[in-house]
């Protein structure tokens, strides 16, 4: 019997994608190559590991057992490869990091400046999505580490506090609330809202805040970029709620921040990584660096 590590990697990729075609794209191989490899794997093991249900590929009970064993084998293989190719000396390596765009602008660059200078051979591969999707990608081992917003969706993560700050109401200078130092959601029931989309945790927090006050928000625009949201607020399309840090980094004399009295006003950034999985030396070193340099959670954008 011949089992090779490539077959096991292909097998894991198909299981996680639940699709031969998507796995082929993720693994940068052709679909016929995957199909042939899995046929050989089933022949070598003398078992059926896949079956088709609807449009998705499912695994048999034999396949489930193989999946858990294959993960351990591939992780061990990667550990050996890393050690033999200089990663223990941190001369090279890739760290897959994810974060929402606002954190990418406001937190990540300043936090890693010293790390990049200390380990110039390491490369970052970045994914930027909403906090919910970023957390799911870490949970599925598609990212090594991520910077995200509380709350956390799983207890399978190691969590390192990074920043504690606030979300604030954002209005233009002609808005009736402009002289207020703080507002409740009840004060906003007659306003139109310009918000980041529902892939962002902030969106769900705002909806929850409005419902706590007994109304559904009138959302006129859902956008994917915070700077576009700010510009729409500036011209009077509506109000928004955004992290204070991003507004302090890019101040605008026509934009006013007002404190928001609600539990969802907390903007707590944390770093997460998956517990109980093998992480390359490069990733372990990065996590240690962040733990040492994040210090007490605080605002780090000035």
Image (cartoon, rainbow, N blue to C red):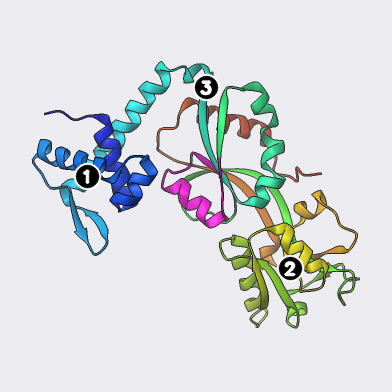
19 shown above or below 115: below
Can residue 156 be seen?
no
Label 3, on which residue? 92
Label 2, on which residue? 240
Question: Residue shown at 70%/46% (left/top)?
Answer: 105
Frontmost of labels 1 and 2 is: 1
Q: Looking at this view, is 302 or 228 the one in front?
A: 228
Dot placed on the residue nearer the N-terminal end, 2 or 3: 3
Label 1 and label 2: CA atoms lie apart by 50 Å
- Assign a secondary structure to mark 1: helix
Dot placed on the residue nearer the N-terminal end, 1 or 2: 1
Q: Is residue 66 magenta?
A: no
Q: Is residue 136 magenta?
A: yes
Residue 5 lies, in percent from the top left, at 27, 30
Label 1, on which residue? 35
Dot placed on the residue nearer the N-terminal end, 1 or 3: 1
Please give the range of residues in magenta: 126-149
Are the residues at dot 1 and dot 2 in contact (C-beta closer than 8 Å)? no
Are the residues at dot 2 and dot 3 in contact (C-beta closer than 8 Å)? no
In the picture, measured across the screen, residue 279 lies left or right of residue 43, that is right
Residue 53 in which image quadrant: bottom left
Residue 76 lies, in percent from the top left, at 33, 28
Question: Residue shown at 88%/71% (left/top)?
Answer: 178
- Assign a secondary structure to mark 2: strand
């Amino acid at each position: 019997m011949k089992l090779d590590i490539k077959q096991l990697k292909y097998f894991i990729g198909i299981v996680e994608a639940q699709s031969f075609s998507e796995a082929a794209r993720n693994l940068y191989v052709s679909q016929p190559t995957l199909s042939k490899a899995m046929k050989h794997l089933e022949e070598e093991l003398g078992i059926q590991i896949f079956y088709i249900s609807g449009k998705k590929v499912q695994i048999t009970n034999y396949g489930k057992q193989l999946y858990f064993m294959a993960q351990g084998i591939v992780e061990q293989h990667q550990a050996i490869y890393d050690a033999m190719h200089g990663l223990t000396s941190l001369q090279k390596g890739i760290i897959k990091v994810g974060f929402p765009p606002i954190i990418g602008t406001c937190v990540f660059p300043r936090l890693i400046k010293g790390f990049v200078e200390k380990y110039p051979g390491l490369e970052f591969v970045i994914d930027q999505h909403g906090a919910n999707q970023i957390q799911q990608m870490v949970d599925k081992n598609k990212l090594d580490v991520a910077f995200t917003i509380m709350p956390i969706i799983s207890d399978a993560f190691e969590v390192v506090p990074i920043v504690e700050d606030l979300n604030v109401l954002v209005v233009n200078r002609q808005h009736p609330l402009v002289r207020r130092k703080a507002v409740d959601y009840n004060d906003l029931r007659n306003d139109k809202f310009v918000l980041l989309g529902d892939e962002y945790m902030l969106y769900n927090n705002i909806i929850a805040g409005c419902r706590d006050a007994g109304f559904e928000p009138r959302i006129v625009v859902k956008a994917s970029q915070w700077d576009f949201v700010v510009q729409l607020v500036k011209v009077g399309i509506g109000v928004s709620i955004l992290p204070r840090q991003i507004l302090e980094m890019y101040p605008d004399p026509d934009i006013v921040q007002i404190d928001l009295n609600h539990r969802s006003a907390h903007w707590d950034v944390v770093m997460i990584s998956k517990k109980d999985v093998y992480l390359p030396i490069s990733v372990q070193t990065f996590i240690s660096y962040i733990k040492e340099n994040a210090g007490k959670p605080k605002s780090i954008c000035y």
